[in-house]
Structures are given as C-alpha cells and as structure tokens.
Image (cartoon, rainbow, N blue to C red):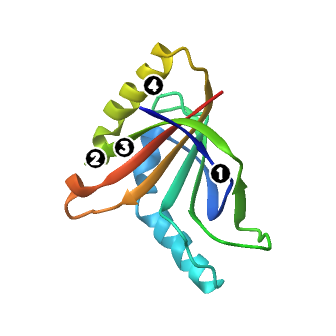
Amino acid sequence: MEIKKIKQTKVFGREIKTSLGKIEEHVKVLPESIASEMNQKGFESNGPQIWVYNGADGNPTTELDLLVGYPVAAEAMDVDITALEEFNCATLIHNGAWHKLSESYQKVIGEVMQNGLQMTGECREIYHQVDFENVENNLTEIQIGIL
C-alpha cells in the first residue's frame, strides 16, 4: 500500500447508476462509447481510463454511482467533463484478471484499517494497461479515498 495525493483531474466521461453485480455489463462497452464520443467532440485523452465508485460497499446488489471517463486537458468545461477534486488515497497496483480485483481490494482495505485511516467512501480504479486477450497483462491501480 502506498499513500498518495492525486491532483485535480478533468475527465470526459459518463455517470451511471449500477451495482457491483452488474458492473461487467459496462466493461469495454461503456469506455468504447465514451472514447468515440470524446473523439467526435474533439477531445484527446491524456491518460488511462478512470472509474470512480461512490457508494460501493462490497455487496453485489447495492446501487452505486459510477463515473467512467478519460482524463483530458480541457480549459473550458463541457457538459461531459467532470473535475475530479484532489484525492487523498491509499493505493495498490493489481496485476492480472479483474475477477480477482476483490482480493486486492481486501488487501488494501485491510492495510487502511490496520493503519487507523478513515475511508471516504470513494474508490477509483485507474486502468494503466488493458488487455482483453491476455488478462494477466492487465495493470489496474486501486485507489481508496482516505481522510
């Protein structure tokens, strides 16, 4: 686990309501749709895709707010651009398949609790490397918001 302060990031994205049990419905499809729309509007991504979870409690049926987007260098705000505020977090890099993400979440959350840190309820995933053909190549940074 590493503690980081993430600077404000502007993302071109879309917010939806979903649950952890239905999250697979949005993998690949939603990011591709957002990337296509972003390109049509003339925005260029300047980093890996970001998924921001608010209200996730580990229960697969709990409804949560999810923002999926790509960082952009935008001076003017657009209806599709959200400014993610500075974010203090505990991070861990997950190597490999996403169906094993829960193991990495358990590890980092355990370390957060062990160190007496308080979680904010916001989690982010940064997809540094996405490989649908060879999932062992995936590199996902888990960020747990802390106070």
Could you tell me which secondary element the residue under label 3 belongs to?
strand
* Residue bearing the label numbered 3: 93
Q: Amino acid at mark 2?
A: Asn
Q: Is residue 61 left or right of residue 77?
A: left
- The residue at the point 55 percent across, 14 percent down is 116
- 10 or 7, which is in the foreground? 7
- 61 or 97, which is in the foreground? 97
Mark closest to the chain's N terminus, 4 or 3: 3
Find out whether the residues at labels 4 and 2 contact each other: C-beta distance under 8 Å.
no
The answer to whether 56 is drawn above or below residue 75 in the figure is: above
Q: CA distance from mark 4 to mark 2?
A: 17 Å
Count of marks, rendered view: 4
Q: Amino acid at mark 3?
A: Ile
Q: Which mark is residue 95?
A: 2
Q: Quadrant of the C terminus?
A: top right
* Residue bearing the label numbered 4: 109
Q: CA distance from mark 2 to mark 1?
A: 24 Å
Mark closest to the chain's N terminus, 4 or 1: 1
- Give x and y (percent) for residue 24: 40, 51
* Residue bearing the label numbered 1: 7
Could you tell me which secondary element the residue under label 1 belongs to?
loop
Q: Amino acid at mark 1?
A: Lys
Find out whether the residues at labels 4 and 3 contact each other: C-beta distance under 8 Å.
no
- Give x and y (percent) for residue 28: 40, 63
Could you tell me which secondary element the residue under label 2 belongs to?
strand
Mark closest to the chain's N terminus, 1 or 3: 1
Q: CA distance from mark 1 to mark 3?
A: 18 Å
Q: Residue 133 sits in which quadrant?
A: bottom left
Find out whether the residues at labels 3 and 2 contact each other: C-beta distance under 8 Å.
yes
- Give x and y (percent) for residue 74: 71, 73
Mark closest to the chain's N terminus, 4 or 2: 2
